[in-house]
Amino acid sequence: MSKKTVYFKSTNLLIEEIKKQNNIEILKEPNSLIKLFKKQTFPDIYFHSGILDEKAMKYIKNSKITISNSFSVKNLIIQKSKLSSEKIEVIYPSINIDYKNIDELKEKYIEKFDFFPTTKLIFFTAKNFKTSGIKEFLEICSSITYPDFRVIIAGSKQQIANLNFSLTKYSKLKDKLILLEDYKNIDELFLISDIFILPTQNKTFATNILKAMFCECVVFLPINNDAKEIIDVYASMERVNDPSTAFKIDAVLYDDRELNKIKIENKEKAMECILENNLNKFNQILSQI
């Protein structure tokens, strides 16, 4: 059987796994000299990411199938390219987390960070604190009335250093903050946390939302982000500084039954996006070309 060709602008977990398959050939971007004297070849499958610019549109229109990471992006592609829906497939970002026993893991962190077994943990992490809403996150946490919670913030040394300059404005959180620089075991922080809030300004699918859901966190995310497609209405924020978010968080923190119900539902949704399942989805698409 002949190999199928794949092209992508930026790699991810799924693409790295696909590259290992014997039936796949990765198409390389031709250099300018080749472009001048040779007709450009296009892949069977194009993984779209980033801006829908002229180059992206060329690949979308000339590939047999384009894969996007959300239905929002798919709809935008269809709108701009006028292609049929069948030519655009959606595979959400992949999760590949070593799932550990949460209760055992939490015991380790109770001793490490000195909080009670009943303490609820609210988590924030991002590559870019500012655009991911660190200011809004801290304001939301400052408005929570539930007494027994701690706030974990993990980022680069520089991000945490910059954050320290602005923390005087959030005196209510003074004794609740756990700041972690260049922390190695980020996945463990997702696993021990109860709530993950990401008041991001970015539209691109926030993969940390999927991670948090897989790790049984209740999540909160603005509706401007493409990851809104996988969360329920309760978890949606109308805007990054939505005043209702703190009330919603209080509601689930005061109701253990509802908190655990949402956690289980989120895990079930996120399970659909584990790497193995996404690889199966890709190979199913591949088999139909």
Image (cartoon, rainbow, N blue to C red):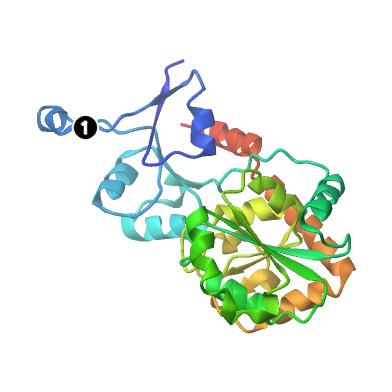
Where is residue 121? Give x, y as percent: 76, 63
Which residue is nearer to you in this view: 64 or 229?
Answer: 229
Residue 77 sits in quarter: bottom left
Which residue is nearer to you in this view: 215 or 137?
Answer: 137
Q: Residues within 10 Å of mark 1 (few under 14, many from 20)?
A: few
Q: Is residue 14 above or below residue 19?
A: below
Is 219 on the left or on the right of 49, as rendered?
right
Where is residue 266? Give x, y as percent: 73, 57
**Residue wearing tag 1:** 40
What residue lies at 77% left-to-right and 77% top-to-bottom? 250
Is residue 237 visible in the rendered image? The answer is no
Secondary element under disc 1, as helix, strand or loop, is: loop
Name the residue type under label 1.
Gln
Where is residue 125? Give x, y as percent: 59, 58
What residue lies at 68% left-to-right and 74% top-to-bottom? 174
Is 217 on the left or on the right of 170, as rendered?
right
Which residue is nearer to you in this view: 193 or 50?
Answer: 193
Q: Residue lying furthest top in this view?
A: 1
Number of residue marks: 1
Is residue 55 visible in the rendered image? The answer is yes
Is 257 on the left or on the right of 139, as rendered?
right
Which residue is nearer to you in this view: 57 or 139?
Answer: 139
Q: Is residue 209 above or below residue 282?
A: below
What residue lies at 73% left-to-right and 79% top-to-bottom? 144
What residue lies at 60% left-to-right and 72% top-to-bottom? 137
Where is residue 187? Give x, y as percent: 67, 46
